[in-house]
Image: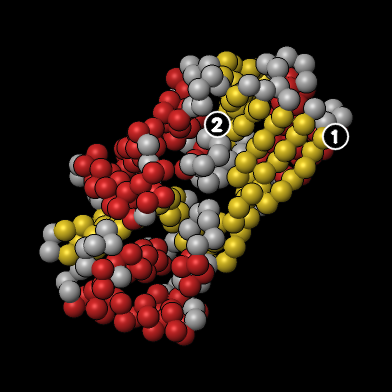
Amino acid sequence: MQIQLIHGNTIFDVLSGEWDTLACQGITNTPFQHLAYQKAWWQHLQPDGATLHTFVARDEAGKLVGLLCLYNDDGLVHFNGCVEETDYLDAIVLPDYAEALWTAVFHHLTTSFPTWHTLDFCNVPQDSPSRVIVPHAAAQHSLAFTETIHEVCPVIQLPATFDEYLESIDSKQRREIRRKLRRAQGAEAELVIVQPGDDVETAVTDFLDLLTKSTFEKRDWLNDGRRAVFQDTAKAALADGSLLLMFIEVAGKKASALFNFDYNNHVLVYNSGLDPAAFGPLSLGEVLTAKAIEWAIENGRTTFDFLRGDEAYKYRFGAQDTMVYKLHVEK
């Protein structure tokens, strides 16, 4: 295996023809490993003064087999995309090359990488082999390693039918979902899903408007950089078929929204929006979540992933925790 360290954001153009082919086969395969998301995050949300450094690994035939995109923020090194906006992060590497990539990375980190004191690798999924490889590589270089649970990602394992799903959850919640769905139907609430050919920029703007109305916290969180990441990511996801942007409309007015990824047989709920002042008694946020779960089941998806956060409503819908970890290394 040959490894090269490339500095700066030219990496996104250099690997534009190869990146996503690798990402789709990597040890952690989610939309957050794809070029469009990685590039958008760095372009719009890079910390002031941080520098980007990417390890690129190729096999003897020159095929891209691994990459690790990091940024150095005054000696603190993170995955590109860390921390707040990105739910799953990891090396982007073929399974058979994961150990070799990390071994080479730690060699460079301790010899030729720009000066650092701490590696903070956030949001590593619980099943990632990096959780086994990184502590071993750190020990080989006499570096201090700790692992902590960073957050939870509640996930629903989907059955074959929506009726089976409803039977699997708490009986009180089951009755509530059925009641709210009937009430929404009576109000002629309509599920609208953004399709290829639709004006995705306007749809994302509508979604973000609902997001800012949801809570004061979301309103304050949504800065210009995050707006741009949503727009860029949505355009790329619509083009590759992985965008699942859903609204509930009543009388032509958008009242709730879910920004999902429909990816690799999983639905991942990236964020949500709700206008509490619009049709509040109809509980259209919960109605849309139920409709999204129903859509996922009817379309043969295997999991419904709420992504990070332990909000109570996720468990009412029957989700069970999976973990994402922080891998912490110090000199």
Residue 263 x, y percent position in the rendering? 44, 50
What's under tag 2, amino acid-wise? Asn
Q: Quadrant of the C terminus?
A: top right
Residue 234 as seen in the image, left or right of residue 158: left
Alpha-carbon span between mark 1 and mark 2: 24 Å
Tell me: residue 102, above or below residue 217.
Answer: above
Q: Secondary structure at mark 2?
A: loop
Q: Which is more toward the observer, 84 or 189?
A: 84
Residue 255 as seen in the image, left or right of residue 217: left
The disc at residue 67 is: none
Q: Which residue is located at x 13 percent, y 59 percent?
A: 252
Residue 329 occupies quadrant: top right
What's under tag 1, amino acid-wise? Ala
Residue 67 x, y percent position in the rendering? 60, 28
Which residue position holds label 2?
80
Tell me: residue 293, above or below residue 324.
Answer: below
Residue 177 occupies quadrant: bottom left
Residue 230 as seen in the image, left or right of residue 253: right
Tell me: residue 291, above or below residue 47.
Answer: below
The disc at residue 139 is: 1
Is residue 246 visible in the rendered structure shown here? Answer: no
Q: Quadrant of the N terminus?
A: top right
Residue farthest toward the left in the current orientation of the protein: 251
Q: Which residue is located at x 55 percent, y 21 percent?
A: 50
Residue 138 x, y percent position in the rendering? 80, 33
Q: Which is more toward the observer, 71 or 96?
A: 71
